[in-house]
Amino acid sequence: MADQNSSKLTHLPTYNTNIPEPPQPSAVRIIQPANGNPGPLGLFAFAVTTLIANIYNVGAGVPAGGGGSILMGFALWYGGIVQILAGMWAMKVGNTFEATAFSSFGAYWAAYGYMFMPGTMVKESYATLPPETLQNATGIFILVWALLAIILSVGTTRSTVATVIMFVFLDFHLLFMAGNEFGHYPEAAWPKKIGSVCGIITALLAFYNGAAALWLPSNSHIILPVGPFNNNNDNVV
């Protein structure tokens, strides 16, 4: 009888006693990172610097082309470094166009500001050369950026009307500015005046596009139309 009971006991089911303890509440709240939109920051950095530069170029309040020392700070920091950062953040969120445009024109403004930085001796290094040498060098500099701007313009043709118009005026701005240098015209000559007006319009359109991207139904009662060329919402800027 005892043997039968012991035999039954050996066949009793066994249970896993290694039950994990329930997780303890953490003192640190873990927040999943969220990606923002770097577009408005890049557009505003470009707009502010472009607007100030071209107001100086048309001679509003200063001699035509004056105000370089004050512009240097905006060009280096806001138009340069901040716009480059916006480009890197655009790459992080997968927007290759914005990353290319913001980083490139951030470098453009940083280089432009460097020319006016005391001690760099950029303009002074041309003092012993023929007068037109500096203008030719500046013309080549601007013309190459105009080529890049045209390439970027083609990349906006499936985005929005506001973006395309902004880049078209940017193209004309750079082409007229380069033409002023190659033509060896003075600062207040008509090609630079036309180019500067195109630059002001470009900056105002950049402000508009930046506000359109920033003012969303979640945070604003004002929504700006941008006129999409296509029916999907994959706007590049």
Image (tube, rainbow, N blue to C red):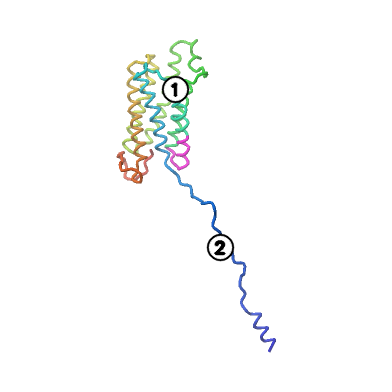
Q: Looking at the picture, which amino acid does disc 1 mark?
A: Phe
Could you tell me which residue is drawn at 62 percent across and 74 percent down? Answer: 14
Residue 81 placement, left or right of 237: right
| Magenta segment includes 90 | yes
Callout 1 secondary element = helix
- Where is residue 102 drawn, in percent x and y? 43, 33
Q: Residue furthest front?
A: 27
- Where is residue 5 drawn, in percent x and y? 66, 85
Could you tell me which residue is drawn at 43 percent across and 40 percent down? Answer: 95
Callout 2 secondary element = loop
- Circle 2: is it few (<14), some (14-19), or many (20+) Cα within 10 Å? few
Could you tell me which residue is drawn at 51 percent across and 51 percent down? Answer: 30
Q: Nearer the viewer, mark 1 or mark 2?
A: 2
Could you tell me which residue is drawn at 32 percent across and 35 percent down? Answer: 162
- Where is residue 232 drawn, in percent x and y? 34, 45
| The image quarter in which residue 101 lies | top left
| Magenta segment includes 231 | no
Decide which of 224, 141 is in the foreground and name it.
Answer: 224
Could you tell me which quadrant the N terminus lies in?
Answer: bottom right
- Circle 1: is it few (<14), some (14-19), or many (20+) Cα within 10 Å? some
Disc 1 and disc 2: Cα gap in Å?
A: 65 Å
Q: Looking at the picture, which amino acid does disc 2 mark?
A: Pro
Could you tell me which quadrant the C terminus lies in?
Answer: top left
Residue stretch rendered in magenta on the structure? 85-97
- Where is residue 155 drawn, in percent x and y? 38, 36
Query: Mark 1 highlights which residue?
Result: 141
User: Any mark on residue 218, and which?
Assistant: none
Q: Which is more N-terminal, label 2 or label 1?
A: 2
Q: Is residue 140 above or below residue 29?
A: above
Query: Mark 2 highlights which residue?
Result: 22
